[in-house]
Amino acid sequence: MSKLYIIPTPIGNLRDITLRAIDVLKEVDEILCEDTRTSSRLFREYGIDKPLKPFHLNNEHKVVSRLVERLKAGVSMALVSDAGTPAISDPGYLIIRECLKEDVPIEVLPGPVAFIPALLYSGFPCEKFRYEGFLPHKKGRMTRINEIVDSATTTVLYESPHRLVKFLRALEEAAGPERKVSVSREITKIYEETIRGSVSEVAAHFEEHGVKGEFVVCVEGKS
C-alpha cells in the first residue's frame, strides 16, 4: 500500500511552493490535478515530470473508488488543485475521506491558502473567525448573508468577480452601510491590492473602478 500526499500549490506567485512539496511531487508515481494544463506550467518551472491525471469537480465521484484501489495496490499519488490547498473550496474532500475509510495513509503538506493573507490584510480580529468558502448562488444565499451579519466574529469568504458588488450591496442592505469590510484581490500576483472601509465605500469603489481578478472578502464581526 502506498500513500496519498495532499500538496498545496502557489495561488499566484510560482515561488510560493515549499522545497518539500517539490521533492514529493518528483517522487510520487502519479499526480492528480484539477486542470492538467494549469498544473503543467508549474511543473515545468520546477522540472517535475510525472504522469498527470485529471481530478476535478466533474469527475471526482466517478474516479475516487478506482484511485483508492490503485493506492491500495501500491501506487503513490499526490493531489494538487489549480491554486492553493486541495479540499479548501476545491476538490479533495471525497478522496481524503475514502482513503481514511480504507486505511490508506495520507500526508498533508502545509502551504498556500488565499484566505489567510486576506484575513491578516484586513486588520480585523483573527484569533477566532468563520470561513464561509463560496456562498450559494441562489438558494440559501440570503440566509448565509444574514448569518454573516449576525456573527460576532470576523467572516472570510471567496467571491467571484461578477457577484462581488452584488454581494457587497446585499451585505450593506442587511448590515447597514457602516459595517466594515476588507476585499483583497489577486493575492501574491502583480496587481494584488486590498480595499478596506465601510461596506458602502468598498462597494462604490468597485462600482467605479471595475471588478477584475480573484477575490477574498473579510467582514468585521458584529459589535
Image (cartoon, helix red, strand yellow):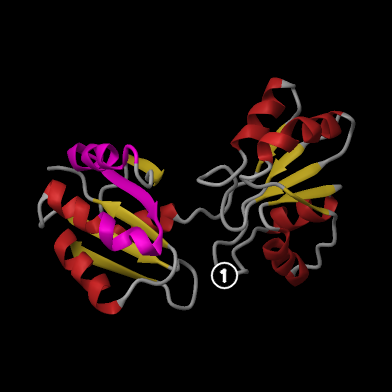
Question: Does residue 25 appear in the picture of this structure?
Answer: yes
Q: Residue visible at 65% across and 58% down?
A: 18
Q: Taking 93 as reference, is 100 left or right?
A: right
Where is residue 23 drawn, in percent x and y?
Answer: 77, 55
Quarter of the image with the N terminus is top right
Please report the residue visible at 57 percent of the width from the left and 42 percent of the height from the top: 87
Q: Is residue 168 left or right of residue 163?
A: left
Where 212 sits versus 97, above or below? below
Whether residue 123 is visible to the viewer of this picture, yes or no, is no
In the image, which residues are magenta?
139-167
> Image point 10% across, 56% down: which residue?
178
Observer-nearest residue: 220 or 200? 200
Q: Residues within 10 Å of mark 1 (few under 14, many from 20)?
A: few
Q: Quadrant of the C terminus?
A: top left
The residue under label 1 is 13
Residue 115: percent from left, percent from top: 42, 53
Q: Is residue 162 above or below residue 33?
A: below
Queried whether the magenta region covers residue 163, the answer comes back as yes
- Looking at the image, which is closer to me, 88 or 60? 60
